Image (spheres, grey):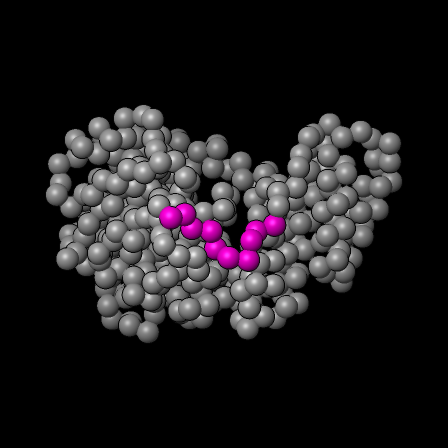
Amino acid sequence: MPSVSVIIPTYNRCGLLKEAVESVLQQTYADLEVLVVDDGSSDDTRSVVAHILDRRIRYLHKHNGGQSSALNLAFIKATGKYIAYLDEDDLWPPDYLKTMVNELDTKKDYGLAYARVVALYPDGTKKESTRTQQCKSGWITKYFFEVYPGLMPSGACLRRSACQGVFWDEALRRSPDYDFFLRVSTRLPFLFVPNAHIIKRWYPENLSSSKDPISFIEKAHILERFLFHLDGRRYVSPRSIRRKISRNYRKAAKILYALGNRDAAISLIEKAIRYYPMDMRLFVDLLAILLKTKNQKNVYSWQMPPPLPAFISVTQDSADCRT
């Protein structure tokens, strides 16, 4: 039985996948298995994996259901003491896994270790993207509502025994990692490992989420569920949660206004005010929209996504239960 199960979900990115898998196989820590979960790809993913001749690789194919469903399936199939995630477009330096495992082996009070992130741009330049002063160790749930720690799935390694029954929410498309790590943070302490890092390959499409109103609304829905259905007030003050919900609705409103949907922007600003009326900027925003665009027609079509259900959505293909 391997010590570490490395989970790599993938969908139609076979060119990048090969490099990601090879960065795992070249680790100085060799006691591992690699679970490549093909989420219904239509490219040459199967062939690419088949031509990587290493017995530690396990190829799992499933019908397309999204990254979270792939992660859930792999978690169930994994046999390692530790679970490490790697996105198909990211890379690990050779000593990454050895460093992370050694930290968890020696600091047994922690259930999850996370590393720094170094951005690699298309022109070959690298840049440290982690603000280490914001990366905390211990029970860090409260920091999700202050300054979000530099958490990325590719830089996280966790104890499998500590996360039994905690699944990725398959209803989420933009922010499943934020939701997953938030819920995990209420169960176990996190350890920041500053002497380990991953390489995040950035492309123009990676940057589009900052201009996507759905990503902010999805985070607001995650936090609403955390507050109203997952007993979030046990871990963080309701005021902090409401303020964070409000901020996400405000960000989405500003994007929608810039795109040309006045009505949606007004609706979201009003939601933000209901959650946190102490933020005077919201009233300034609302007044500015009402005065500047009184007779403006909407030129950007958009529909509000529905709230999340109270439970975590997991398909039968991935698990036989809901958490």
**Quarter where residue 163 is shown:** bottom left
Does the image show residue 125?
A: no
Q: The C terminus lies in which quarter of the figure?
A: bottom left
Q: How many marks?
A: 0
Give the percent coordinates (x, y) of residue 74.
Answer: 30, 49
250 vs 100, left or right, is: right
**Quarter where residue 199 is shown:** top left
Q: Which residues are magenta?
A: 307-316
Q: Main secondary structure of the magenta part?
A: loop
Q: The N terminus lies in which quarter of the figure?
A: bottom left
Give the percent coordinates (x, y) of residue 136.
Answer: 44, 65
- Residue at image point 25% right, 34% down: 18
Up the image or down, 276 lies above or below 138; here it is above
- Residue at image point 38% right, 38% down: 201
- Residue at image point 21% right, 34% down: 49
The answer to if 144 sits in the magenta stretch is no
Give the percent coordinates (x, y) of residue 270.
Answer: 76, 50
Up the image or down, 53 lies above or below 273; here it is above
Does the image show residue 58?
A: yes
Looking at the picture, tell me which residue is in the foreground, 192 or 217. 217
Up the image or down, 277 lies above or below 43; here it is below
The answer to if 311 sits in the magenta stretch is yes
- Residue at image point 26% right, 60% down: 82
Give the percent coordinates (x, y) of residue 117.
Answer: 39, 50
Looking at the picture, tell me which residue is in the foreground, 41 or 205. 41
